[in-house]
Amino acid sequence: MIMAPTSLEGLTLGKYRVLEPLGRGGMAQVYRAYHPQLDRYVAVKVLRSDLIEEGEFLARFQREARAIAGLRHPNIVQVFDFDVQDDIYFMVMELLEGDTLKAYMNTYRTRGDRIPIPDMVRILTDVLDGLAFAHSEGITHRDIKPANIMLTRRCQAVITDFGIAQILGATHYTISGALMGTLHYMAPEQGLEGHGDSRSDIYSLGIVFFEMLTGHPPFEADTPLAILMKHLNDPLPLPHSIDPTIPEPLERVLLKALSKRPDDRYQNAEEMATALRNAAAEAQITIPEHISLPISFAAGEPVTGPGAVYSGTAREQIAGASFAADDTDSSLGDRLKAGLASLGNNQAPDQNDPPIPGAVGLRSSHQDPAPLATLLSSWWNLLPPAARAGIAGGLTLLGFNIWAVMFSSATKGFVIYKFGWPVELFLVGIILCLMMAALNLVWLMIPAGLVLGNAVIFSYFSLTGRWGDWLFMWPLEPLLLVASLALTFSVYNQGTLKNEYIRKLTRLFCLGSTVGVFLIVAASILKGFLIVK
């Protein structure tokens, strides 16, 4: 692992003399620095050494940083330079004077108020303009949240931290952990699969919009896994049910931005910006040319050095809440997987593990496994109500069917077994499909495919009575396995469309299984086979 000094104060990185730390984030340490030749104060962002891999990292760092430095837009923080010195990877950017949107929202929240809606629209359109430009250059942010939006003394919103997720995006933290970021603001496909596109940024900004309107994010829970499952499965709370004064046209824009499926959202930032401006006009909201100055600016705090610098209040906020409580968690993916594992382990919190915002401590692996009932209860609570009802109904029918098959064996009524066995397979297949759709676990398609395929084969035997045909039909079993594997991997490779394919296949399988059960039951009734003589 590459090691770097714990503090860089007083050192010189390239042309820049490091002065003082401004804050520490999940992926970088930020310092105030000075360029003596240009008489300019800048921000130097030093990437955390424990997130840096050997090998291809330098080439990726140079490639991504060069692309980010090419982003010249008034609503994107300007990157001036990037370099590596003594295994220290750093980026140099303009040092803005202002507060983060997170700090601004907290100021209003402590007064029991919210940002004026015209200012909200101005902030969002500024951010969307910056995102539209970046997306047109092929760059996505992947970590949009209030802490990464600055409100400057120039009375405009500026997006910060562009590119850090991309630079670190190919490290083992992302590959093994599947994701890197802040779950409260993360799009479903980004949280589940670890990748996204411009529409993922749209979703994240929609969460920011929701929080500005209502005072809190839409999905909150005690564990990171539970937050992720809410993004995937829970319906979005309607903002007007929280605050009836929210204009309906703005709510329409918000609901579209927060669609679960990327294809149902605005397809680019420019489209959302146009819709937001039209909604503001419909609601008779006049969008100000500039954002109202944050409360901390009212005192006219003097600038502490040449060029654009953080105000004292902003520096305090950045060093505190903005870089800690709501910051990107670079180990989130690994810890989310640990959260999944902890469902089966009754473990004590690891005191050395940094806390996840809104999450309970993760657990040591030195405790005995929890009882099976605890494990099943944990998974059951993750399912949406509709899936619970479907699975409960399927299990009830399955239990009755198993009882009937056992009864037929005890009474030597082979006819009940003959028709009950394929029905049982269909019911098991339906339950597996419902669990696959509810948990978005594509790998459940393998056992579901095998079970449903056998249900079809045994239905043929039951309806025709030609059980002897098994002698030449058994080669269908390996073909079923190959087909199930091929279909599963085909769906898995669909990227952001994977979950939509899972839902469509679930509906198809459940419909086919229901038809199969109906035909078998109808045939058994017509032939009088349900009566044990």
Image (cartoon, rainbow, N blue to C red):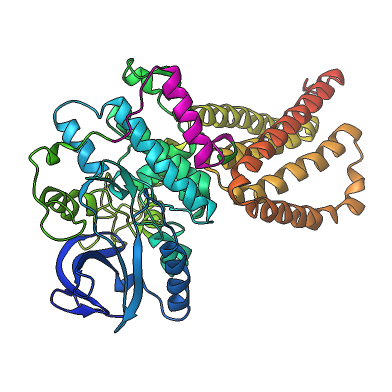
Residue 436 located left or right of residue 468: left
Is 520 a magenta residue?
no
* Depth order, front residue of 97/389: 97
The residue sitting at the bottom extreme is 86
Asked if residue 269 is among those painted magenta in the image, a careful observer would answer yes
Which quadrant holds residue 416? top right
Q: Say which residue appears at 24% left-offset and 59% top-offset.
A: 95
Residue 89 in picture, x, y percent from top left: 33, 75
* Residue 228, x across and y down, in percent: 42, 44
Q: Position of residue 7 (x, y in %)?
A: 16, 74
Q: Residue at x 28, y 52 (%)?
A: 327
Q: If the image is split into quadrants, where does the C terminus sit? A: top right
Q: Position of residue 177 (x, y in %)?
A: 43, 61
Horizontal side of 204 relative to 422 (left or right) equals left
Image quarter in which the N terminus is found: bottom left
Residue sitting at 39 percent across and 54 percent down? 336
- Determine if residue 226 is in view: no
> Is 164 drawn above or below residue 234 in the view shown?
below
